[in-house]
Every structure is written in structure tokens, then in C-alpha cells.
Amino acid sequence: MISVEEALRLVAKHARPLAPGRADLADCSGLILADDVTSELNSPPYDKAQMDGYAVASHDQVPQRQVIETVAAGDLPRRAVTPGTAIRIMTGAPIPEGADAVVPFENTKNVGDHLIELSQTPIQPGDHVFPLGHSVRAGQTILRQGTMLRPVEIGILAEAGRNRIQVIPQPKVAILPTGNELVAVGQTVAAGQIRNSNGPLLTAAVQAVGGVASDLGIGRDDPDELRRLISTGLEADVLLLSGGVSAGDFDLVPETLSNMGVQNVFHRISLRPGKPLWFGVLEGQSQQTLVFGLPGNPVSSFVCFELFVRPALGQLAGRGFHGLYQQEARLSSPLSHRGGRATYRPAYWENQHDPVVEIVPWQNSADLAALASANCLVALPAQPLELDTGSVVSILLI
Ligand code: AMP
Ligand code: MG
């Protein structure tokens, strides 16, 4: 059995960023930019009013000005500002010729018909004017390859007129829970059957990290049926199976995968819960498929997803091989860890400034209800440990 660290190293070695492709800007949120991007335009594209007020010539000393025109955002000024005049201007409108500053309404007062008096002195050239190209110059690189496209970058790309973007796509992930005892949510559970909770859980977990999940339904413990469903799953970038990877008489997943040419990288790791994890790769002509045979027990399946599948999906999407956010916390009560395997215990932490963590009581790796009351996993090493209240442990936030 290999260690969690060795298993992570092997998954990281095989997970490669997907080939970039072009996408519409509207579909790029959360993706990684695959090329540098330059701006098509100056921004702003003209000297622009930054306040509602009066466009004036700053060097003009007279306090009173004749208002000769009104310009709204989206309009073009038809007249020029000359000594003794001003143009009423709205935020976003182009500065008229002859003007070099805007005096906000609050610094003016009406003193007659189309006549205003400025209470602001002196007026500096450029007051409340956003000059052409001051934010971005045409041809300037605005975003670098490798940048994550957050909402603000999507906005910058829109401003720069870039509608088709070269990005690394999100991985397509096929999900195949296996087991004769499984029935789909919405169906009646007969004697000896249980609901397929792993399918919906894994679908949601994939979606939570941006992956494109496709549910293949439930695979029976039958070699022909498994073969048929797995061959569909192998068209995806990642295939997640659950169940059928342990030592039972009907655990057919490893053998079926091997028969189909999926090269096994490791099977069984020194981890609790999650020991039966199977990982392999199918190398195709143009693409590869990473295959994870996750344990059937829901908590084990979840822990293996968070430890191994999450960083692999990040790596495929170009974000890098990163696990859950990790931090330290102090135990709220003593903990006896029997060791033997690296262990991840569902727990609840609170108090941002001085984090304290409490282990959630649970029955076993089928106890999904206990996991639902947890907000972290306490990471314990393979060595046995007797920890007192207040001992510092490492927690992974879920
Ligand atoms: P297996 O690895 O197939 O022996 O499954 C281990 C345990 O997990 C068994 O008790 C299964 O009934 C349970 N199990 C397997 N698949 C699922 C699933 N999709 N949803 C919930 N429980 C499952
Ligand atoms: Mg099974």
C-alpha cells in the first residue's frame, strides 16, 4: 500500500492541463487564460466627464459663465467652450473642445437664464476628466496567459472588445456509481437496496470546482454492462466510478478497467477512510482519461474526491494541483489516534481568530449524516498519537 503523499505525487504526475480552445466571453468565468490579451481600443476612448457638472476652460478666470449647450452620455458636443462660456455635461459624456475640466453641479449656482456662477477656485486642468487611453492604451497587454478569469477580468475583456477568448476548458467528468443494491433517488427502495448517494454527491462535488459533470446512471455488477458504461465514460477527461473496487466477489471494476486498456497506476492506499482507491490512466491518440475507482462507502468516496480528484481537476483546468484549504486548529477535547494509516476525521471548527476544532462522532465510512454536520477534516498521520485538549492539529476546510 502506498502513502497518501506518494499517491498524490502519482496523480499530479499524470494530470496535465487540457488543450486550450476558443470560447465566448460569456462562457469564460472561472477559466484560465491561455494567451496574452491586448486591448483593441483606448480606454476611455475619449476624454470623458467623471462628474455631472459644467465643462469649462480651467484658465478662464471669470466667475460667471454662459451655458451654451447640454451634452448627455452617448451624445457628442456640437459646440466648443470659449472664454466666458460653459457646457452642461453629464458623467460619461465626451469633453467638448476648448474645455479641460468639469466643475461639479454642487460647486456652481444658477444666477440667471443660462447663466451660472462657479464657487470652486481655482480650477485645475483635468479636474474630473478621465483622459483618453488613461486606463488602457490600444495594443497594450491587459491580461497575461495563466490568469484566472474572475468577474473583474471578464469586465476588462469586455471593455477591451475581446469576445472570443483562448482559454483552458473545464474538464468533462463522467460519473458512474456501481452496485446491484443501488437505486436512483426518486425510485422506491425495495428490501436489500439502498439509494445511490454517491452519484449526486460526486456530481455536485465536480460542479463545485467548475467541472462539467455527466451522470452515466447506475452500473450493475455485471462485466458486460460495466464495459458498455465505462467505454462511454472513457470519452470524458476524467471518469469517476464508485464502488466495486474492494475485495468482494462482485467487485469487478479493477479487472474490467484493466481489460479495457486502462493502465493502473495504484490500487489501495494507506488512508482511512478511502483505502480501496484505484487510480489509472487511459492514453488515447489525442487525449488522456484519468480514471478514479472511488470506494463505495460515501464518506470514503467523498474523502478520496477531496484529496485526489479535486486537485487533479484543478490541474486539468490549468489552475494547478491544489487541495482543500488547510489551516491549524486546537483540539477541543483529547483525541486518541490509533495510527496505521493516514486518517481524515470529520470535525467541526469555529472561531476564526483562535480556531478550535471538535471531532464529530461517527459510526463508520457509511455515515454520511455525521459528515453533513462537519465543516472540516482533521488530518492525522500514519503514526499513533495521544493528543490532549489544546493540541494543534491540521484541518482541511470542506
Ligand atoms: P463496494 O465497494 O461496492 O463494496 O461498496 C461499499 C459500500 O458502499 C457498500 O455498503 C455499498 O452498498 C455502499 N455503496 C456503494 N455504492 C454506493 C453509492 N453509490 N451510494 C451509496 N452507497 C454506496
Ligand atoms: Mg459494490
Image (tube, rainbow, N blue to C red):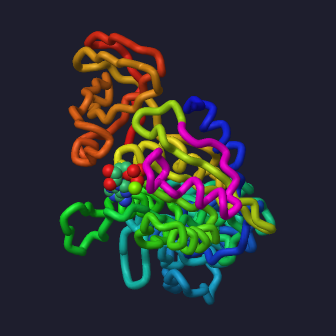
Residue 22 in the image: x percent, y percent?
A: 71, 74
- 394 and 5: which is toward the camera: 5
| Lateral position of residue 142 relative to residue 27, left or right | right
| Residue located 57% across and 29% down the image | 3
| Lateral position of residue 68 relative to residue 379, left or right | right
Residue 95 in the image: x percent, y percent?
A: 61, 74
Residue 105 in the image: x percent, y percent?
A: 40, 68
Q: Is residue 391 above or below residue 351?
A: above
| Lateral position of residue 199 relative to residue 323, left or right | left
| Residue located 58% across and 67% down the image | 172
Answer yes or no: is residue 152 visible.
Answer: no
Which residue reaches farthest front? Answer: 249
| Residue located 59% across and 61% down the image | 256
When asked about the image quadrant of residue 199, the answer is bottom left
Ligand 1 image position (quadrant): bottom left
- The region drawn magenta spans 244-268
Q: Quadrant of the C terminus?
A: top left
Q: Quadrant of the N terminus?
A: top right
| Residue located 67% across and 40% down the image | 10
Residue 254 shown in magenta: yes
Q: Is residue 283 above or below residue 224?
A: above
- 52 and 191: which is toward the camera: 191
| Lateral position of residue 111 relative to residue 284, left or right | left
Residue 42 in the image: x percent, y percent?
A: 72, 70
Answer yes or no: is residue 327 visible.
Answer: yes
Residue 286 shown in magenta: no
- 212 and 268: which is toward the camera: 268
Q: Is residue 268 above or below residue 199?
A: above
- Total labels: the figure holds 0
Which residue reaches farthest bottom? Answer: 78
